[in-house]
Image (cartoon, grey):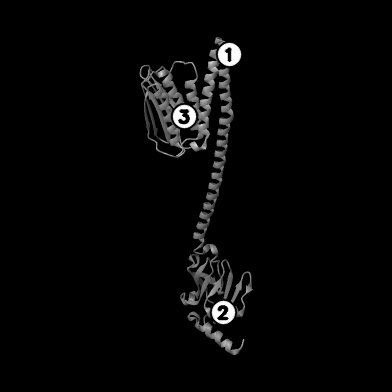
């Protein structure tokens, strides 16, 4: 070190933060991983009046006193909560700095004998790691939302494709039923008519029964096809089909109809199975009115209540005893169809006071 550099270094030590040359001077800095700082590095620290550290760096600072007295030294690091109060070092002014979070701090060292007068002060700048930057949390929120959004998008695409596949399968099944089964049932009806012309009288009741069963099978198949077809996944189409059937059948027997629908929705409120069974229960209820009730009036009301679609069919006919056993499986079919797809049915009837059939269909809202 030449004479001019030595003079400059002494002046820096004298003027640095008001430090007196007779008190403390920065003698050495030692890095836990890199070893001793070079002399020119220490001089740069003094020149810029700050010690710059990376996150989690550990350094030891050694000071040297210009006096031969033994003082009890202490230090503190302002802005660091755990080190903001004075801590004793003993008679050796050597300090190992603790690991500090990113930010700006001020290191100070004093002696008890000097009434805690600050003998040396050094600003410390600790660089912040990326998760301590202000933009880290908003970025993480953005990334999480982006991932959720992308996941939701791909899930919706997958769900849409699955729905399209299901609709294609449903339409294909409906077409197969219409073409194959319908053709076979119609062939049966034709063959029965041919047999009727050449059969003896005692076989005609059997042939009539075959014809009747074939006709009912065709109607059941048509109702099933209607329920399967994806284009009918619309609650209003379900209502129109109910109204159309009731108007046609009851009108043919001069039975007046009051049809009150209070559910206005174009959504698919029912599953395919619910739509099919609800319609068949309604259809059988209307047919029973025509066949057995001797009614002059029928009231149909549809409304929503407690996440359920309520369908009530009432007539002013002769009624019946619900405890009496009847031939056929009509009432049992009602209960069986209802149990199959999360529906409940209640039948109230009294002789001379008509019949009320209440169907409750649980829906997802």
Query: Pointer 3 and pointer 2: residues touching (CB < 8 Å)?
Result: no
Q: Is residue 264 left or right of residue 113?
A: left
- Identify the secondary structure beneath mark 2: helix
In the image, residue 207 lies at what x, y percent?
55, 16
Q: Is residue 69 visible?
A: no
Q: Residue at x 44, y 21 (%)?
A: 288
Label 1, residues with CA under 10 Å away: few <14, some 14-19, many ≥20: few
Q: Residue at x 58, y 71 (%)?
A: 59
Q: Which residue is mark 1?
A: 198
- Identify the secondary structure beneath mark 1: helix
Q: Nearer the observer, disc 1 or disc 3?
A: 1
Q: Is residue 321 above or below residue 105?
A: above
Q: Earlier in the sequence, mark 2 or mark 1?
A: 2
In the image, residue 347 lies at what x, y percent?
42, 23
Q: Which residue is mark 3?
A: 279
Q: Residue at x 61, y 80 (%)?
A: 39
Q: Nearer the observer, disc 3 or disc 2?
A: 3
Query: Pointer 1 and pointer 3: residues touching (CB < 8 Å)?
Result: no
Q: CA distance from mark 1 to mark 3?
A: 39 Å
Label 2, residues with CA under 10 Å away: few <14, some 14-19, many ≥20: few
- Identify the secondary structure beneath mark 3: helix
In this view, the residue in front, 154 or 109, is 154
In the image, residue 36 lies at what x, y percent?
63, 75
Q: Quadrant of residue 289?
A: top left
In the image, residue 149 lies at what x, y percent?
52, 52
Q: Which residue is mark 2?
A: 44
Q: Is residue 132 visible?
A: yes
Q: How many discs mark residues in the rendered view?
A: 3
């Amino acid at each position: 070190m030449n004479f001019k550099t030595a003079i400059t270094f002494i002046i820096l030590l004298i003027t640095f933060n008001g430090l007196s040359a007779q008190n403390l001077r920065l003698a050495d800095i030692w890095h836990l991983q890199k070893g001793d700082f070079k002399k020119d590095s220490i001089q740069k620290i003094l020149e810029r009046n700050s010690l710059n550290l990376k996150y989690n760096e550990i350094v030891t600072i050694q000071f040297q006193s210009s006096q031969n007295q033994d003082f009890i030294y202490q230090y503190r690091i302002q802005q660091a909560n755990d080190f903001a109060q004075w801590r004793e070092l003993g008679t050796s002014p050597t300090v190992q700095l603790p690991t500090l979070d990113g930010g700006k701090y001020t290191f100070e060292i004093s002696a008890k004998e000097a009434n805690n007068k600050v003998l040396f002060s050094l600003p410390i700048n600790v660089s912040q790691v990326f998760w301590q930057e202000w933009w880290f949390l908003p970025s993480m929120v953005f990334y999480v939302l982006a991932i959720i959004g992308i996941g939701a998008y791909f899930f919706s695409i997958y769900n849409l494709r699955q729905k399209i596949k299901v609709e294609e399968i449903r339409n294909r099944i409906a077409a197969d039923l219409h073409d194959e089964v319908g053709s076979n049932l119609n062939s049966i009806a034709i063959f029965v008519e041919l047999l009727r012309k050449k059969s003896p009288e005692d076989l005609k009741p059997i042939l009539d029964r075959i014809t009747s069963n074939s006709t009912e099978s065709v109607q059941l198949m048509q109702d099933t096809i209607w329920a399967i077809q994806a284009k009918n996944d619309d609650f209003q189409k379900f209502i129109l089909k109910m109204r159309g059937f009731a108007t046609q059948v009851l009108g043919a027997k001069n039975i007046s109809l009051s049809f009150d629908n209070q559910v206005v929705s174009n959504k698919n409120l029912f599953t395919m199975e619910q739509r099919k069974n609800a319609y068949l229960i309604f259809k059988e209820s209307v047919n029973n009115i025509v066949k057995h009730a001797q009614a002059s009036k029928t009231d149909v009301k549809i409304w929503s209540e407690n996440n359920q679609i309520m369908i009530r069919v009432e007539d002013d006919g002769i009624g019946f005893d619900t405890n009496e056993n009847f031939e056929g499986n009509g009432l049992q079919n009602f209960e069986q169809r209802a149990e199959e797809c999360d529906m409940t049915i209640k039948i109230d009837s009294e002789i001379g006071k008509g019949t009320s059939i209440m169907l409750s269909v649980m829906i997802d809202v």
